[in-house]
């Protein structure tokens, strides 16, 4: 009887409890649901942080910055933001470079990047590097002006320049009419940018058309001038000086070295060849000139050359090039470092076409390091095969040959983006990609720098070095333009820029001892740059800019112990660049980190208790705080790192306790 009464009493209590529970307001019943949503956001933020950490690990080179480096990093990011605000409706790296070249060079970002220590310019063609204006200045301001002639034939050679004692048929002395053949008039006709055809301008992605415009420019004021023995040394010195003016301390150039001459009217074409079949005089001259320059400019690291073979040459010529490169390496081991094949890759022979010549080189054990132009193409491999009848091999197939042949670096490397496995091999084998942003745009391979595959290579951890290709002949003149395009369009920070610069030394052709010495010199220029930029940044009055505003924080809840990474979103955070950022959660303070002009990262430190605290932040080392109506709740156990999970969104959440109680009451009352 007593048991029955207890049971009836318990039944009544349970019945009343369920009725009361099911009639509670939804606001009360929904409290746990709200907590679950915020907890989800907390877990989401933890996993988002993990993804960012994994990306950094994949990149493989990110490093912490010193206090002064952090200030410079933030300052550069602010300058980038300023430049973007001024140009976002006509973002320069997304527009034809020739249309905005002067605006780029006149920008504050460009001014700073020109001072940035770039290490080496790793992909250049020696005869086409320095600006045509500088070349003409050298010639016009010397006795050479009296032998400078210009072609006046009505053909593609018109306006071509050459040195002659007596002007040949179809040529006249420049001094015969200095008004017509002034430097200003000549410059209009001897660079690619100044002579782009209307068809090329209308078809910026047609690399074939762009190469047709570039091809004649190589002969307008290039090799034919540089190889004149009375001009060669002037040219080399000017090349080294131009490099240092842009804070480039090291150069590696593709060069033939064949054909040095002096003027002699009795010789064929008025040019008497003075060198042997290997070009010894050229390489001896280059060695002497770089040594002379280094002795006067100790910050300059050095200069090396890579023999350039012609991609359109026949197998016999290829065999001779490989043998010549081997001989030259033995004769000039400190200057000649390898061999490359140059010219338009889509219009040349494939690497496989020369497999017999490469096989003979290995069989003779006369190995020459390969630094190959490779995958400079937009075409898929099933469409663009070699244009030569005996070579039906795709341009893009060259990526396989470069890997198997053991290339030390690959030039351009655009097509590797279509070969993820080969990208992994580039990373594993430390084969650097020589990236040439402006050249790639001018030749129609990349029309928007934001889409350049180099961004992926960098983030994937493939070593990347920057080069300028043919800045003088193309007409944009300065390597800093490439750095501007990359910095503005690729999301690069100071650590990225420094890695690109150091890569140029670490993946150079220098010996181990030379590389060690080079890094010492580089670090000296780096420290100078950081000191100067830190001073400039902290001399700037950011208080005169728009007032900062805080819009939101994410997440709004975090762990009661340890640290929770909190993102602070807003605008105009530049005031903090040279100041300490202090994040305050109630009376708990931590240092903040400037990420962008619209993002700061804070760490909310739990003390083991549950609490909801007001959020405020100081951007001026605690002098005053920006108060907000935002709150942060310390209320969860610290989330452990997920194993093999990428997002909490992908996993169904279990039913809440509220849901279980409601279900139980429903079953009790109605079933």
Image (tube, rainbow, N blue to C red):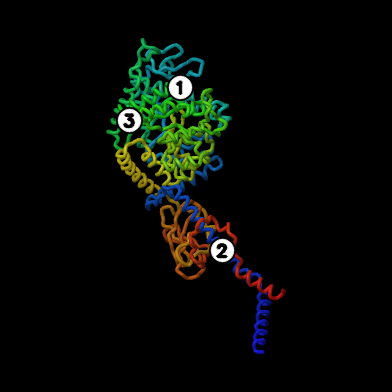
User: Looking at the rendering, in which quadrant would you find the C terminus?
Assistant: bottom right
Q: Looking at the image, is 32 positioned above or below residue 322? A: below
Quadrant position of the N terminus in the picture: bottom right
Mark 1: few/some/many CA within 10 Å (<14, 14-19, 20+): few
**Marks 2 & 3, CB-CB < 8 Å contact:** no
Q: Position of residue 190 (x, y in %)?
A: 46, 24
| CA distance for labels 1 and 3 | 27 Å
Residue 314: which disc? 1
Query: Can residue 140 be seen in the rendering of this structure?
Result: no
Mark 3 residue crowding within 10 angstroms, few (<14) / some (14–19) / many (20+): many
Q: Earlier in the sequence, mark 2 or mark 3?
A: 2
What is the CA distance from the residue labelled 2 to the residue labelled 1? 69 Å
The image quarter containing residue 161 is top left
Q: Viewer-nearest of labels 2 and 3?
A: 3
In the rendered image, which residue does mark 2 sit on?
38
Q: Is residue 431 visible?
A: yes
Which residue of the protein is positioned furthest toward the top in this rendering? Answer: 266
Of callouts 1 and 3, which one flags the residue occurring earlier in the amino acid sequence? 1
Q: Is residue 467 left or right of residue 555?
A: left
SS at circle 3: loop
- The residue positioned 37% from the left and 14% from the top of the image is 165
Task: Find the residue positioned furthest to the left.
Answer: 295
Mark 1 residue element: loop
Q: CA–CA distance between discs 2 and 3?
A: 64 Å
- Give the mark, 2 or 1, whose residue is nearer the N terminus: 2
Disc 2 crowd rating (10 Å Cα; few below 14, some 14-19, many 20+) is some
Mark toward the viewer: 1 or 3:
1
SS of the residue under disc 2: helix
Circle 3 residue: 335
The image quadrant that residue 367 belongs to is top left
């Amino acid at each position: 009887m007593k048991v029955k009464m207890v049971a009836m009493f318990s039944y009544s209590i349970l019945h009343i409890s369920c009725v009361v529970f099911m009639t509670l307001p939804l606001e009360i019943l929904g409290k746990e649901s709200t907590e679950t949503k915020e907890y989800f956001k907390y877990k989401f933020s933890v996993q988002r942080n993990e993804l960012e950490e994994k990306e950094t690990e994949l990149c493989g080179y990110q490093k912490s910055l010193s206090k002064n480096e952090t200030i410079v990093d933030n300052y550069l990011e602010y300058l980038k933001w300023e430049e973007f605000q001024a140009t976002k409706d006509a973002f320069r790296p997304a527009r034809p470079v020739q249309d905005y070249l002067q605006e780029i060079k006149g920008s504050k970002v460009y001014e700073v990047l020109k001072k940035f220590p770039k290490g080496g310019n790793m992909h250049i063609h020696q005869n086409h590097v320095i600006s045509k204006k500088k070349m003409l200045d050298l010639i016009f301001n010397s006795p050479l002006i009296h032998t400078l002639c210009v072609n006046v034939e009505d053909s593609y050679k018109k306006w071509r320049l050459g040195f002659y004692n007596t002007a040949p048929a179809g040529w006249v002395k420049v001094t015969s009419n200095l008004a017509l053949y002034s430097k200003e008039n000549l410059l209009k006709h001897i660079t690619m940018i100044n002579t782009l055809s209307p068809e090329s301008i209308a078809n910026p992605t047609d690399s074939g058309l762009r190469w047709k415009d570039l091809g004649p420019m190589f002969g307008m004021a290039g090799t034919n001038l540089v190889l004149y023995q009375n001009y060669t040394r002037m040219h080399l010195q000017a090349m080294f000086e131009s490099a240092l003016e842009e804070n480039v301390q090291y150069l590696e150039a593709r060069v033939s070295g064949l054909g040095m001459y002096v003027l002699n009217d009795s010789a064929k074409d008025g040019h008497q060849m003075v060198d042997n079949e290997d070009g010894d005089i050229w390489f001896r001259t280059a060695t002497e000139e770089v040594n002379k320059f280094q002795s006067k400019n100790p910050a300059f690291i050095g200069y090396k050359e890579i023999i350039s073979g012609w991609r359109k040459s026949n197998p016999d010529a290829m065999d001779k090039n490989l043998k010549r490169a081997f001989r030259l390496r033995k004769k000039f081991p400190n200057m000649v470092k390898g061999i490359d094949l140059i010219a338009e890759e889509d219009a040349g022979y494939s690497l496989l076409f020369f497999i017999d010549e490469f096989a003979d080189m290995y069989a003779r054990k006369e190995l020459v390091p390969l630094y190959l132009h490779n995958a400079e193409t937009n075409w898929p491999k099933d469409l663009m095969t070699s244009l030569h009848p005996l070579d039906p091999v795709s341009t893009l197939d060259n990526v396989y040959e470069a890997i198997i042949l053991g290339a030390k670096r690959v030039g351009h490397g655009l097509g590797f983006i279509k070969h993820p496995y080969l990208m992994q091999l580039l990373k594993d084998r430390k084969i650097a990609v020589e990236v040439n942003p402006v050249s790639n745009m001018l030749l129609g391979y990349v029309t928007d720098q934001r889409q350049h595959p180099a961004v992926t290579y960098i983030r994937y951890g493939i070593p990347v070095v920057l080069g300028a290709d043919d800045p003088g002949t193309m007409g944009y003149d300065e390597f800093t333009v490439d750095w501007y395009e990359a910095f503005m369009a690729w999301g690069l920070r100071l650590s990225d820029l420094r890695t690109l610069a150091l890569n140029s030394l670490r993946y150079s052709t220098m010996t181990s001892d030379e590389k060690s010495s080079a890094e010492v010199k580089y670090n000296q220029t780096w420290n100078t740059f950081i000191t100067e930029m830190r001073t400039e940044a902290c001399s700037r009055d950011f208080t005169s800019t728009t007032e900062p505003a805080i819009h939101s924080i994410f997440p709004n809840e975090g762990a009661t112990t340890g640290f929770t990474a909190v993102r602070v979103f807003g605008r105009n955070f530049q005031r903090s660049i040279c100041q300490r950022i202090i994040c305050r959660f109630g009376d708990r303070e931590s240092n903040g980190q400037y990420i962008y002009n619209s993002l700061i990262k804070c760490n909310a430190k739990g003390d083991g208790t549950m609490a909801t605290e007001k959020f405020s932040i100081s951007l001026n080392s605690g002098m005053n705080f920006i108060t907000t109506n935002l709150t942060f709740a310390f209320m969860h156990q610290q989330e452990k790192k997920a194993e093999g999970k990428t997002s909490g969104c992908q996993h169904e959440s279990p039913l809440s306790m509220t849901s279980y109680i409601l279900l139980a009451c429903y079953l009790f009352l109605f079933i």
